[in-house]
Structures are given as structure tokens and as C-alpha cells.
């Protein structure tokens, strides 16, 4: 898809503002060897924003180059910090919408952890959809009412009805977002079914020049205003819109709009007039951040420092590729045992467990996500390690 129209509102005014060439087309696929990792297919990123609605898309995205299968290892469920957030979110939604003994449906459920939480906390029945689900991974003791269909959610599954629909960290992977949200709206019908979506926060990406959050699988990016416009345009009334998890995620809660609702698009459009300035500021921040890290990595290499990254997910793939990192970093650490032993797409860096560091004894650990700083520092201290911790 080389977009000439906006996939959110069908507008024709798309303005390109950021390009990255020759990036791995998957950042969470498990690569068994360095050769496989370095020779993995590449694609280009060309981000453009819509002047009519503020939506941001990769105009060079080709869906045929992405893969979502059992070897797509995206879960954050091995982090204590993340699990505290995840459970609190599930408890909040169960309480807010009275999800007790109900049917809940999750689109893009991954390995099923959040769906299982909703079922465990509320005694609910869960239906999930995800081609990357791995049977046997999810521990179902006490919440066995979870079933997962290993396929993409689409119109053909609209006959599955639920009392609550959620979709976490999936919409950003979908190119034709307008059609997809319309499909969800059609599926819930006229009933007042609450719908919850969570996606990366593009407001933060723009403000911080967060190039580590731009990678190939993410073909769709939303500011809060653009997200609200999309759901209202597709026939929803927005109940709640906010940022969570250190401002990294946007969450939106809504219900189908009724005929009594007069407003079709109530989002304040003032942000559209300043969006060109915001993307220009992103370009400046990006260059500043890239220069800073080039200097840091060069200085560490000159000192002969043993440097590792902590976190082998998409942020690390984007960081290593954007910075053209090779020997400056020796290893990438991850708490997810399913990722240990694999290699980083693009650069081939080996992924190791935290315990590996007790012998390697790094001088510097670069955190791919600052929210885990306390967790990482504690894990290092348990091994008698006190390296410098640097945050992106």
C-alpha cells in the first residue's frame, strides 16, 4: 500500500514528514540464527499525516511483508511492572462495565493474558482472535472459559456477540483503520456494548522524537484527537479518552452512537492547525536524539565499555537499526524466556537472559523502556551488578 489517501478518513491531503529506509519488516519474530536475522526481508517507512483528520500512516507499508504467527513473540507478561498495570486495567474495566458472568471478546489477544485476566476477575467467558496465539502457553487454571480462534478478526466473525469488546495494541498494525473500526461498529450492532481500544500514543512520539517507537509493523499512528475522530466517524460515542503507562499508551472507551446523539465528530479541530509545527518539532527532536546517542555509543566504544540493551522487542529493533549499531553493543537482554537464544532482526545481536549478565558483568545497560528502570535495577542488584543505567 503506497497510500495517496488517508486510511482513516479517506482524505487526499497526506504530508510526508519522516523516512527510514531498509528496516526489518518484523521486529518480534524469533530469529534462530544471526544469518536469518541479518538477511530478513526489509521495507521502507515513510510517515505522512492527514491534514483533514491528523491520522499518521506509513505510506510505503506492504502487508504481505509482515508475519503474525506462533513465532511472533510480543508478550510483555514476564515483567512484574507490566503485570501490575495489566491487572489494574482489567480490574478497572470489569468494575466500570459490570463484567460479571458476561461474555468478553478480544481482538488481537496475543498470547491471551489480558483476556484471561478479564475472565478470572469477573468470572466471564472469553473469546479471542489472534493468528499468533500459541495453544498451551496460557495457564487456564481457574478461568477455563477462554477460547481463542487463531485467525485475524474480520467481518466473517461479526456473528460472535459479546457484552464487552476490547482490542489492545492491535489497531496500529492495521493499515485500513477506517474500514476495520467500521467492521467492529457493525458487529456490535445497536446494543450498548462497551468497546475498549489501547494503542501507542503518537502524541508522545511527536513530543519526544521517539524514533524507537517507529517500526515497520506499526503502519498506523494516532494522536488522541485523531483517535477520537475515527471512532466518532465510525458511529461511536466516546466515553473516555486518556494516556496511560508513562504516557506511552492511548486508551479509548466508547459505545455505539444512538440516533439521539447529535454530534458525529465532536473532537476539537484546533490541533490540526498546529500539527505541521508538531511534526516539524518531531524532526528536530529526532535529529537531536539520534546525534546524542551516536555520541554516547562512540564514547562508550572508545572506553571499551561492555554495553548491553535491556528489552529485545520492537523498540530495540528500531534503536539498533536507526543508530546502525554493531559491535558497540554486545548483547540484548530480555526477561521473556521464549525470546532468549534468538537474534535481533536486522542486526543479529544475540538475546540473552538476565542471568547471563552475572558472568558478563556489563558496564552500561541501555533501557529500551524507562518505565522498567526500577525493575531492571533490582534484577541487576540481585546479581551484585551496578552498571550505569541509561534511558532512551
Image (cartoon, rainbow, N blue to C red):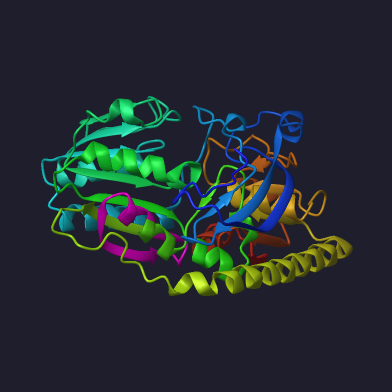
Q: Which x, y percent locates residue 373? A: 54, 64
Q: Which residues are magenta?
A: 230-250
Q: Quadrant of residue 139?
A: top left
Q: Quadrant of residue 206?
A: bottom right
Q: Residue at x 65, y 41 (%)?
A: 351
Comparing 53 with 115, the one in front is 53
Q: Quadrant of the N terminus?
A: top right
Q: Which x, y percent locates residue 299? A: 84, 67
Q: Residue at x 36, y 60 (%)?
A: 228
Comparing 147 with 155, the one in front is 155
- Within the magenta stretch, is there residue 246? yes
Q: Quadrant of residue 190?
A: top left
Q: Which x, y percent locates residue 199? A: 43, 53
Q: Residue at x 40, y 32 (%)?
A: 130
Q: Which x, y percent locates residue 82? A: 42, 55
Comparing 2 with 362, the one in front is 2
- In the picture shown, does residue 259 fall above or below 266? above
- Answer left or right for 331 relative to 228: right
- Can residue 232 be seen here? The reply is yes
- Answer left or right for 331 relative to 295: left
- In the picture shown, does residue 352 fall above or below 52? above
Q: Residue at x 48, y 61 (%)?
A: 52
- Answer left or right for 304 relative to 368: right
- In the picture shown, does residue 176 fall above or below 362? above
Q: Quadrant of the C terminus?
A: bottom right
Amino acid at each position: 500500500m503506497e497510500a495517496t489517501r488517508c486510511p482513516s478518513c479517506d482524505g487526499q491531503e497526506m504530508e510526508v514528514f519522516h523516512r527510514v529506509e531498509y528496516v526489518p519488516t518484523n521486529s518480534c519474530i524469533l530469529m534462530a540464527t544471526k544469518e536469518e536475522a541479518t538477511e530478513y526481508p526489509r521495507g521502507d517507512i515513510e510517515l505522512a499525516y492527514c491534514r483533514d483528520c491528523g491520522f499518521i500512516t506509513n505510506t510505503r507499508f506492504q502487508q504481505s511483508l509482515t508475519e503474525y504467527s506462533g513465532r511472533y513473540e510480543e508478550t510483555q507478561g514476564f515483567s512484574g511492572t507490566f503485570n501490575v498495570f495489566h491487572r489494574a486495567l482489567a480490574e478497572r474495566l470489569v468494575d466500570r462495565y459490570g463484567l460479571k458472568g458476561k461474555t468478553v471478546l478480544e481482538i488481537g489477544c496475543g498470547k491471551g493474558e489480558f483476556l484471561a485476566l478479564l475472565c478470572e476477575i469477573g468470572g466471564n467467558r472469553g473469546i479471542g482472535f489472534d493468528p499468533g496465539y500459541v495453544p498451551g502457553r496460557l495457564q487456564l487454571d481457574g478461568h477455563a472459559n477462554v477460547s481463542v480462534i487463531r485467525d485475524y478478526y474480520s467481518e466473517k466473525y461479526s456473528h460472535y456477540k459479546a457484552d464487552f469488546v476490547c482490542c489492545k495494541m492491535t489497531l496500529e498494525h492495521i493499515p485500513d483503520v477506517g474500514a476495520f473500526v467500521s467492521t467492529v461498529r457493525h458487529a456490535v450492532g445497536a446494543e450498548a456494548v462497551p468497546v475498549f481500544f489501547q494503542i501507542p500514543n503518537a502524541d508522545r512520539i511527536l513530543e519526544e522524537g521517539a524514533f524507537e517507537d517507529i517500526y515497520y509493523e506499526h503502519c498506523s499512528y494516532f494522536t488522541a484527537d485523531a483517535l477520537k475522530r475515527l471512532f466518532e466517524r465510525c458511529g461511536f460515542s466516546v466515553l473516555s479518552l486518556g494516556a496511560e503507562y508513562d504516557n506511552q499508551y492511548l486508551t479509548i472507551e466508547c459505545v455505539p452512537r444512538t440516533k439521539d446523539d447529535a454530534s458525529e465528530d465532536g473532537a476539537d479541530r484546533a490541533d490540526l492547525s498546529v500539527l505541521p509545527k508538531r511534526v516539524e518539532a518531531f524532526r528536530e527532536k529526532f535529529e537531536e536524539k539520534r546525534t546524542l546517542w551516536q555520541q554516547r555509543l562512540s564514547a562508550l566504544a572508545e572506553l571499551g565499555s561492555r554495553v548491553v540493551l535491556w528489552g529485545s522487542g520492537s523498540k530495540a529493533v528500531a534503536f539498533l537499526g536507526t543508530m546502525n549499531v554493531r559491535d558497540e553493543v554486545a548483547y540484548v537482554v530480555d526477561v521473556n524466556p521464549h525470546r532468549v537464544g534468538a537474534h535481533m532482526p536486522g542486526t543479529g545481536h544475540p538475546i540473552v537472559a538476565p542471568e547471563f549478565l552475572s558472568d558478563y558483568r556489563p558496564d552500561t545497560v541501555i533501557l529500551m523502556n524507562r518505565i522498567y528502570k526500577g525493575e531492571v535495577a533490582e534484577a541487576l542488584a540481585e546479581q551484585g551488578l551496578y552498571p550505569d543505567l541509561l534511558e532512551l
